[in-house]
Image (spheres, rainbow, N blue to C red):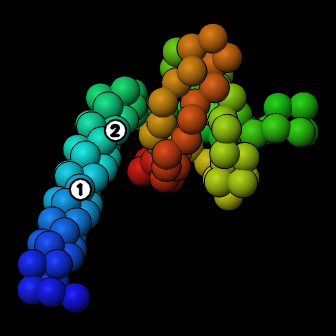
Amino acid sequence: MNTSSVLRVMLSFLFGVTFFIGDAQTNQLIASDVASSVAQNQSREQPSATTFAGKIVSQNGERFILRDDDNQIWYHLDDQQQAHKFFGKNVLVTGVLDGPTDTIRVRSIIEAKS
């Protein structure tokens, strides 16, 4: 192999490596931008939580609900395990209300101070 052939091979190799590295960096930037955009959209779309006061009671002995006697309303609770822990107690439930089903998507339940 003569010197010019070796030089061409080396230049081709260097050009290929540079192109590959540049392409990888571009893909990382694109992936980073996409991830950032998705996170921003999720935070904008996530509804804010509200706190509901009431007493955890059993509905027909099968499901636990939040009964708000002050406003004469009751709510279904999507987290039955957590609700069970507070059965019979006055609580504050923080979550997002799904209006059509009157179900609170529970984020937390704490016992209310008397």
Residue holding disc 2: 38
Which image quarter holds the N terminus? bottom left
Q: Is residue 114 visible?
A: yes
Asked whether the beta carbons under mark 1 and mark 2 sit within 8 Å of each other, the answer is no
Residue 102, placed above or below residue 33: above
Please state which amino acid type lies under the numbered disc 1: Asp
Image spot of residue 46 (x, y percent): 39, 31
Q: Residue at x 23, y 56 (%)?
A: 23
Q: Residue at x 55, y 41 (%)?
A: 106
Image spot of residue 14 (x, y percent): 15, 73
Residue holding disc 1: 23
Residue 44, placed above or below residue 6: above
| Residue furthest front as drawn | 2
| Residue furthest top as drawn | 100
Q: Tell whether 61 sits left or right of 25.
A: right
- The residue lying toward the viewer, choosing from 40 and 99, is 40
Q: Tell whether 47 sits left or right of 99.
A: left
Element under label 2? Answer: helix
Image spot of residue 10 (x, y percent): 15, 79
Q: Residue at x 52, y 24 (%)?
A: 97
Gap in Å between the C-alphas at discs 1 and 2?
Answer: 23 Å
